[in-house]
Amino acid sequence: MKISDMISMCLGNLFRRKMRTLLTIIGVVVGTCAIVVMVSLGLGMNLSQEAMLAEMGDLTIINVMNYGRNENGEKSVLDDAAVAQIQAMDGVIIATPVYNPNYFQPTLYSGKKDRYRMGWATVVGVYSEALPLMGYQLLEGEYPEGPQENRKKPLNVVVGEYTGFDFEDTKSKYNRYTWPETNEQGELLRQPFVDVMKDEIYLSSKQPDQDEKDSKDDDTVHIQREVRPVARIKEDWNKGYETSRGIIMDINDLKRLEEEYIKANKIVVNKKDDTGYSNVTVKVETMEDVDPVEMQIQAMGYNTRSMETVRKPMQESARKQQLFLGMMGGISLVVAAIGITNTMIMSIYERTREIGVMKVLGCVVGNIRTVFLMEAGVIGFAGGCVGVAISYGVSFAMNYFNFSFSGDSGMGSMGGGMIMGGMGGMMMDSGSSSLPVSVIPLWLVVAAIAFATMVGLVSGILPANRAMKISALEAIKHE
């Protein structure tokens, strides 16, 4: 029997009992739609979860802390060699120390006769090449390319979004400070005293309390250096206070300033107790790289902190919820599979004589099985396609009306209470309101149709085998 003949016979048999075939397909439609919608809700929760974690911080950042001793009580040194070792790990984009000087606390001055002053400025040092890679949002300017080797030229630095507002007017009795207040459009109501990107600024080791006359007897040797802000970055508290009102410079420039201050004041530094940097920031390529890189760093004897400790439990919880939702949808498809099996068995009883005639005429037994499997597969495929189409409509409605598990509406509250309770609602509320509640990617469409077709084929195996075993003579005698 030709394939075209089998296809023609398959379609003819299905259309012969239109109502029964339609009801069987509806069962598959309901099952497929249930699975797709349930899985899409799980994917939507995942999306909201990722958005919530992103608001808490960069998911690809690992902070390495050095407390001087590892778990075995041995001394651990987090120096440039250790940073280079971390940099060489697979998946690491950049590893840089975040250096805070121990002996050098600068003050910034600007304006005529040093009228404007920023006391106890937050100055940190990092590798210049790390700045474009750490995920800072550049508001204006360009990142410095490296340390300033010429000591007669200004130091290139990066300033936080509101660094200018930390300058005080030392000549004013009132309103010594300005604040970054904005209107409804987000525009600043007042400008800072110092335009950090245009005005001349210099850095000094002299502190505000040393500007008074009673500090004349102080024998401290102060150093100063002109600085030139070449870039301004957006405030991001997840990346540090320096992005708001601090200053970032090349780590070598900052170390050199501190060394000059130590040397000028003959400060004794005990290098025996030096354990290197207290903090190193590591950025990896993807979230999947965080865990293996973090484990390698911990094996070196250092403590780490990342969003992985938060993401893992949430991801595991979301995975269980998705499995539960998929099982709920799968129950409907199992019921549909039983319906397909019942339909095909009923079809065998009605077509027993036809099967016998086919055998007598010399039709290959395998062709008879193929016809029945084909009919079951077509039912599954048609139901899968229609179910996916309806799922898109349901998904659109849920996103349009912002259906959620948060309890904001009666339906949402009921769904949240029956399915997963407060945790799901919390995650959905934490994400942005613009995020979809239900997400149906292309792979889910293909998987759903393929699964529905497979369910149809599996459901048709028993009836097909039964049709093959019917005796030709008894089948012909059958009325």
Image (cartoon, rainbow, N blue to C red):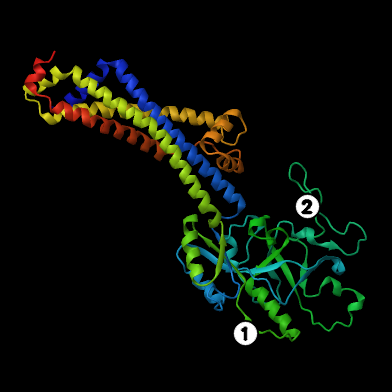
Secondary-structure class at tag 1: helix
Earlier-in-chain disc, 2 versus 1: 2
Secondary structure type for disc 2: loop
Coordinates of residue 292 in the picture (x, y in percent)? 46, 62
294 over 333 or under it: above or below: below
Q: Which of the two residues, 282 or 143, is positioned nearer the viewer here?
A: 282
Residue at (38, 33) in percent of width and height: 331
Residue displayed at 32% across by 22% down: 24
Do we see residue 392 in this rendering? yes
Instruction: Give the amino acid type for the residue marked by disc 1 in the picture.
Output: Lys
Question: Do the CB atoms of the residues marked 2 and 1 lie less than 8 Å apart?
Answer: no
Instruction: Give the x, y percent position of residue 431.
Output: 59, 43
Residue 13 figure quarter: top left
Q: At which x and y percent is residue 48? A: 55, 43
Q: What label sits on residue 180 in the rendered view?
A: 2
Amino acid type, callout 2:
Pro
Residue on which the image places disc 1: 272
Visible residue check, residue 195: no
